[in-house]
Image (cartoon, rainbow, N blue to C red):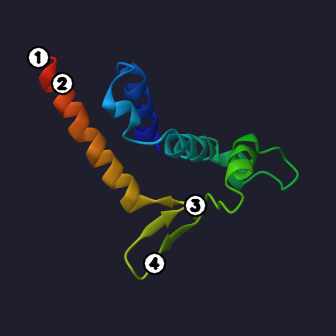
Amino acid sequence: MVAANHLFDVLKGTPRNSAARTAIPEADLNCLRLLRDVYEHWQQHRFAPPEAPRQAEQALKQLYPTAEPWQAEVHPDGRVLIARFVDVSALIEKLEVLEGLLQQETELSR
């Protein structure tokens, strides 16, 4: 998730007309950002009493009600889901597309 945060920073730095900006849909970036926030504040979420405020988890569950940040699932078809809604294989495919676009744009700018 830390790497995802660095990715957000890289994407913010690309030109607005860059194809790389749209390689990963904003909704996907948002869900990763929310999940990263939960993991970044893990002590609040894992060890605090149930009545303690958990802002990052509340924000995540508002958009993804079935999300379970501390759960990973491996399905018979090989798919791996993190938090019940992040499909790791699909994310890797999008990252590979993004990598190719960034390489193309870098080569064109030389």
Q: What's the amino acid at mark 3? A: Ala
Query: Which of 40/84 is in front?
Result: 84
**Residue 17 against residue 53 in the figure, above or below:** above
The local secondary structure at tag 3 comes to: loop
Q: What's the amino acid at mark 1? A: Arg
Near mark 1 (Cα within 10 A), the count class, few <14, some 14-19 or many ≥20, is few
Q: Which residue is mark 4?
A: 75
Q: Which tag, 1 or 4, sits closer to the chain's start?
A: 4
Name the outermost residue toward the right: 51
The local secondary structure at tag 2 comes to: helix
**Residue 87 against residue 20 in the figure, above or below:** below
Query: Which of 45/67 is in front?
Result: 67
Q: Which tag, 3 or 4, sits closer to the chain's start?
A: 4
Q: Could you give the CA–CA distance between mark 3 and mark 4, rounded to whole angstroms?
A: 13 Å
Q: Which mark is residue 106?
A: 2
Near mark 4 (Cα within 10 A), the count class, few <14, some 14-19 or many ≥20, is few
Residue in view at x 35 percent, y 18 percent:
15
Q: Which tag, 2 or 4, sits closer to the chain's start?
A: 4
Q: Which residue is mark 1?
A: 110
The local secondary structure at tag 4 comes to: loop
Q: Residue 108 placed where, x, y %? A: 14, 22
Judged left or right of residue 57, residue 98 is: left
Q: What's the amino acid at mark 4? A: His
Q: Could you give the CA–CA distance between mark 2 and mark 4, rounded to whole angstroms?
A: 37 Å
Q: Are marks 2 and 4 in contact (CB under 8 Å)?
A: no
Query: Which of 25/6 is in front?
Result: 25
Q: Which residue is mark 3?
A: 83
